[in-house]
Image (cartoon, rainbow, N blue to C red):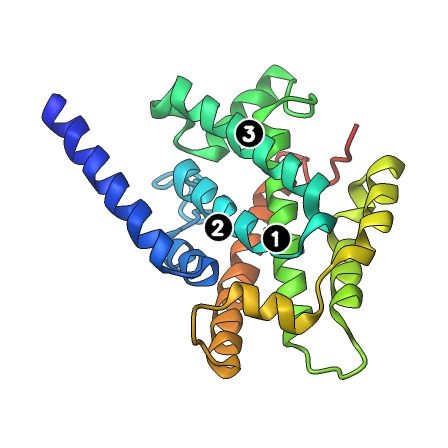
Amino acid sequence: MCICIREHSIREMKRSRDTEKRSEINSAIEELSVLVIVKPGENHEAAPARIPTKPFLSLCYMILQVLDKVGPTMVVIRQDIDQNIKRLEAMYESNPLINSNLVEILKSETSKGIAKKRISGSKSFVWLTRSLDLTSALLQALLVKEPKKNMEQAVQESYDATLKPWHGWISSAAFRVAIKLVPDTKTFMDLISEKDEDCDTLTEKMQILVSLLVPFLEDIHCILKVYKLDRLKSN
């Protein structure tokens, strides 16, 4: 048992060092490349719906680092993401056997009538998914070559399309105030790129990440609809 724990710790330390060497974009691509979702209806009896908890949270952590580069505009959103990651991590640690699958959390909380409660694991999962939606929309907006569109417009449009419909007026008002603090597009692109990485290489990586994120999120939203959590609003 001790040997297994020690080996696991060594692997985690190595993974942490490797992550430090890569950009958040690269790390997110790597996480998504191995993250497989099993949807309901896909040979359901042999393989029940599954979204692995730890890889999903690792992806959310990487995306959090990308959103950090947007600056103070994302402070409120960042705090929510961080809290939701920690809540699901705590649930996982409390029962790794059951909670290693996010769909089992949705199923259990739905059956107990607590899935839509303020501090449920299901609600945390919904909001983390929407944060991924925001990131996907932002990257897509930046990949569209429109000379008149600046970073502020890209962030605003991405927020309007993903989070705003579900936010209350307080969160929306806070975002409107903070939107003026976003960096310009070049600064943001420099912040998410690796050292000495040229624009074409970064753009290609962003395209790869988007191509992985879009179908991944579509699969998640399909599962959320099954549990009637896709229209969940903030309290």
Going by the numbered disc 2, the residue's amino acid type is Met
Residue 41 can be seen, yes or no: no
Q: CA distance from mark 3 to mark 1?
A: 26 Å
**Helix, strand or loop status at disc 2:** helix
**Helix, strand or loop status at disc 3:** helix
Q: Position of residue 174 (x, y in %)?
A: 84, 42
The tag earlier along the polypeptide, 3 or 1, is 1
Q: Nearer the viewer, residue 137 or 99?
A: 137
Residue under label 3: 106
The tag earlier along the polypeptide, 2 or 3, is 2
Look at discs 3 and 1 and give the one toward the viewer: 1
Question: From what the image shows, is residue 201 above or below residue 35?
Answer: below
**Helix, strand or loop status at disc 1:** helix
Which residue corresponds to the image point at 70% horizontal and 63% vertical from the top-left? Answer: 183
Q: Nearer the viewer, residue 43 or 11?
A: 11
The tag earlier along the polypeptide, 2 or 1, is 2
Residue under label 1: 67
Q: Work out which quarter of the rendered image holds the N terminus and state it.
A: top left
Q: Residues within 10 Å of mark 3 (few under 14, many from 20)?
A: many
Q: CA distance from mark 2 to mark 3?
A: 23 Å
Residue under label 2: 62
